[in-house]
Amino acid sequence: MKVVITGGGGFIGRKLAERILAQGSLTGPSGQQEAVTELVLFDAVAPPDELLSDDRVSAAIGDITDGDLVASVIDASTNSVFHLAAVVSAGAEADFDLGYRVNLDGTRNVLEAARAATGTPRVVFASSAAAYGGDVPETVLDGTPITPETSYGAQKVIGEYLITDYSRKGFIDGRAMRLPTIVVRPGKPNKAASGFASGIVREPLNGVAMACPVTPESRMAIMSPRTVVDCFIHMHDLDAEKLGASRALLLSGFSVSMGDTAKAVRDIPSNRAKGEITFDIDPATQAIVDGWPKTTLSERAAALGFPSDDNIKDVIAAYIEDELD
Ligand SMILES: NC(=O)c1ccc[n+]([C@@H]2O[C@H](COP(=O)([O-])OP(=O)(O)OC[C@H]3O[C@@H](n4cnc5c(N)ncnc54)[C@H](O)[C@@H]3O)[C@@H](O)[C@H]2O)c1
């Protein structure tokens, strides 16, 4: 079967690609596990060479806002699409037009291309807990009202509705997942306001000092890269009838404070020289983080068999194993 990952050169897209290649199959048009014979990584940037060395993998490098290009990549023979390409939160807030072009028009391009494919492709869309904003409760539950207060959040919510509506019409077999913050993001810091939640683990373990811009008491809802990849695969393979009328699902992110995260990093026995962690509060970042949910808890996701994490030590251990060892 042919699978396309948009954003396949990004953080989650690459990890998802690795997992699909390792397991070799996904639920196909037959409703049974079928071999993935073609995996296309569509992104504005090239995926790493290690992925491209696999015979099943090819790269399509270009812009998701180019409808003709998207249609040529997600062609008639495409069985499944993971749609992850996006301008992330701070970027979409900084450039209103770019955010709508990529996150809304790009998503329409993906859905229209999938609609034109033979059969009814499964489309899994990466939404975000940025769907919640304003006077958000400490714990976001399945029934918490959707109240985006950023352009990015609004674009993600529109994407969820499009997924549900295209599915209702029978054009695609779509599914959307509302992700909490994924920690630990490897590599260089990005511009996301939540970037410190990865930085506070990543920088010290790479021997670099880290000044956390929020208080040690500040809490966030997080999920590990391994678990979010499990969730993408599970969502893809799930019998759509189990989702019911709404194809959008909240994922559970456990609550962790930055102080506990710093302690867990300091407590890790390691031969590596660790960078120092200090707290140097930036009022603007603190105000943003204070408005975020501290936990996202989805009984619906648990009942449908979606995994979640429950402690920061395991998340850090997985980062060390996957990225450093
Ligand atoms: N990482 C998180 O904490 C998190 C949380 C909630 C939701 N999400 C969502 O999950 C998805 C993946 O996130 P990520 O952390 O891997 O992000 P990422 O920034 O690492 O990856 C996104 C990819 O999209 C690509 N892209 C951007 N604009 C493009 C364009 N015009 N054409 C083609 N490609 C383009 C980028 O080059 C990038 O490789 C995104 O949709 C994001 O909004 C992520």
Image (tube, helix red, strand yellow):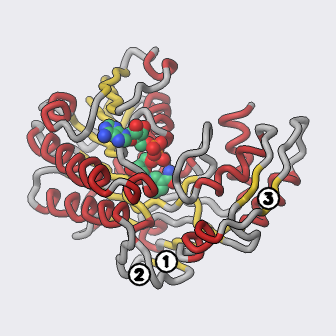
Q: Quadrant of the C terminus?
A: top right
**Mark 3 sits on what residue?**
262
Of residues 14 and 307, the one nearer the viewer is 14
Question: Looking at the picture, which amino acid does disc 1 mark?
Answer: Val
Q: Quadrant of ligand 1?
A: top left
Q: Please rate how many residues cluster around mark 2, counting C-alpha atoms within 10 Å: few if below 14, some from 14 to 19, many from 20.
A: few
**Mark 1 sits on what residue?**
140
Q: Nearer the viewer, mark 1 or mark 3?
A: 3
Does the Cβ of the disc 1 residue fall within 8 Å of ligand 1? no
Q: Earlier in the sequence, mark 3 or mark 2?
A: 2
User: What whole-number distance in Å separates the C-alpha atoms at marks 3 and 2?
Assistant: 30 Å
Say if residue 27 shows up in the picture: no
- Look at the picture and state if 115 lies above or below 59: below
Of residues 207 and 303, the one nearer the viewer is 207
| Kind of element beneath mark 3 | helix
Disc tally is 3
Image location (x, y in percent) of residue 278 = 81, 58
User: What whole-number distance in Å separates the C-alpha atoms at marks 1 and 2?
Assistant: 6 Å
Image location (x, y in percent) of residue 106 = 23, 46
**Mark 2 sits on what residue?**
144
Q: Please rate how many residues cluster around mark 3, counting C-alpha atoms within 10 Å: few if below 14, some from 14 to 19, many from 20.
A: many
Residue 34, picture quadrant: top left
Identify the residue at image location x=72%, y=59%.
212
Does the Cβ of the disc 2 residue fall within 8 Å of ligand 1? no
Of residues 143 and 290, the one nearer the viewer is 290
Image location (x, y in percent) of residue 154 = 31, 66
